[in-house]
Image (tube, rainbow, N blue to C red):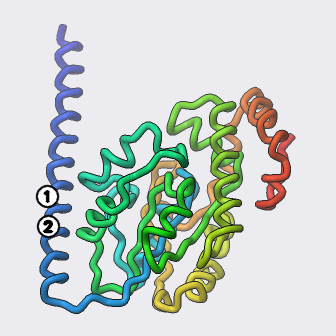
């Protein structure tokens, strides 16, 4: 009986903590909107450019958002948690909680979403930054809705990507591999078809961040004051704040032989896609 009571108190304690955190975040969101309202009212709006990070989940987009946001010319529409615009109040139900969000034919209310995002962007900054993973399947629509639109497409070793999907989403290897290939297919399309797009890999960003920063500066000169740091908070397999670090080897080592066999069944059907991004099959 004592054990049951202790367990119940522990669960209730976690629930109270979550409620407190959510309440705090909601109030912070409200404060940001209020601050930006006065900025829009009393300060001059810049000639804004919309910059979208196109990235599958668990491929380094949060780290990239931190790097770009280090510029004084950038305003990110979300600065909490994974820094995703799809997680903002009112937008969350439309995008993040939409079970069809990964289907490109699913239509979003873009005028409403844009209006909500503008409440969280500081429009006195020239670059308005956004990242929502599901945007990779509808980047062509985003390009029409947000003008002028610029894109950064990032991709990652698909085996490391699968490990993240299996561990974080509790997916099986086959579903993880199919989703990883789906993401790569859309990224290939984005790289080939979008205007104003640059691309690089998670590996390049984590091993040669200075080179990636130069690419970003050439893409948008307004990013000239990006400051690289070793202390960017990131989501990672260690659940530690380790900054700019390539964790692929550590993640791939977590994949069992049985999982690898099932992943490779899917990857072998998409060998051309892997070659496009410069990756090889692991036997």
Quarter of the figure that contains the N terminus: top left
Left/right of residue 260 with respect to residue 16 in the rendered view: right
x%, y% of residue 26?
17, 54
Q: Is residue 17 above or below residue 175?
A: below
Give the residue drawn at x 69%, y 52%.
185
Q: Is residue 86 visible?
A: yes
| Label total for image | 2
Q: Is residue 168 above or below residue 52?
A: above
Point out the residue furthest to the top here: 1
Quarter of the figure that contains the C terminus: top right
Residue at mark 2 to residue at mark 1: CA–CA distance: 6 Å
Give the residue drawn at x 63%, y 37%.
176
x%, y% of residue 153?
60, 66
Foreground residue, 185 or 74? 185
Question: Where does label 2 land, which residue?
Answer: 31
Left/right of residue 129 with respect to residue 163 in the rendered view: left
Foreground residue, 127 or 19? 127
Foreground residue, 21 or 201? 201
Give the residue drawn at x 62%, y 70%.
194
Mark 2: give few (<14), some (14-19) or many (20+) Cα within 10 Å. Answer: few
x%, y% of residue 167?
55, 37
Q: Is residue 250 above or below residue 259?
A: below
Question: Where does label 1 land, which residue?
Answer: 27
Q: Are marks 2 and 1 in contact (CB under 8 Å)?
A: yes
């Amino acid at each position: 009986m004592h054990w049951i009571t202790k367990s119940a108190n522990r669960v209730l304690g976690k629930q109270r903590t979550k409620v407190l955190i959510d309440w705090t975040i909601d109030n912070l969101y409200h404060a940001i909107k209020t601050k930006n309202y006065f900025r829009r009212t009393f300060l001059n709006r810049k000639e804004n450019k919309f910059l979208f990070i196109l990235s599958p989940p668990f491929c380094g987009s949060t780290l990239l958002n931190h790097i770009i946001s280090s510029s004084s010319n950038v305003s990110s529409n979300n600065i909490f948690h994974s820094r995703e615009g799809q997680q903002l109040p009112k937008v969350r139900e439309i995008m993040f909680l939409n079970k069809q969000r990964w289907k490109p034919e699913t239509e979003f209310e873009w005028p409403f979403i844009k209006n909500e995002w503008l409440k969280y962007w500081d429009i006195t900054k020239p670059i308005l930054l956004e990242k929502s993973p599901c945007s990779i399947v509808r980047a062509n629509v985003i390009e029409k809705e947000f003008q002028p639109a610029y894109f950064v497409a990032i991709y990652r070793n698909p085996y490391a990507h699968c490990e993240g999907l299996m561990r974080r989403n509790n997916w099986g290897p086959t579903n993880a591999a199919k989703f990883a290939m789906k993401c790569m297919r859309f990224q290939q399309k984005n790289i080939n078809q979008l205007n104003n797009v640059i691309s690089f890999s998670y590996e390049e960003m984590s091993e040669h961040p200075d080179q990636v920063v130069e690419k970003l500066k050439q893409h948008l000169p307004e990013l000239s004051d990006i400051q690289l740091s070793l202390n960017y908070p990131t989501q990672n397999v260690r659940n530690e704040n380790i900054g700019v670090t390539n964790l692929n080897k550590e993640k791939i080592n977590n994949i069992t032989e049985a999982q690898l066999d099932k992943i490779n069944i899917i990857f072998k059907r998409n060998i051309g896609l892997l070659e496009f991004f410069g990756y090889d099959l692991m036997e």
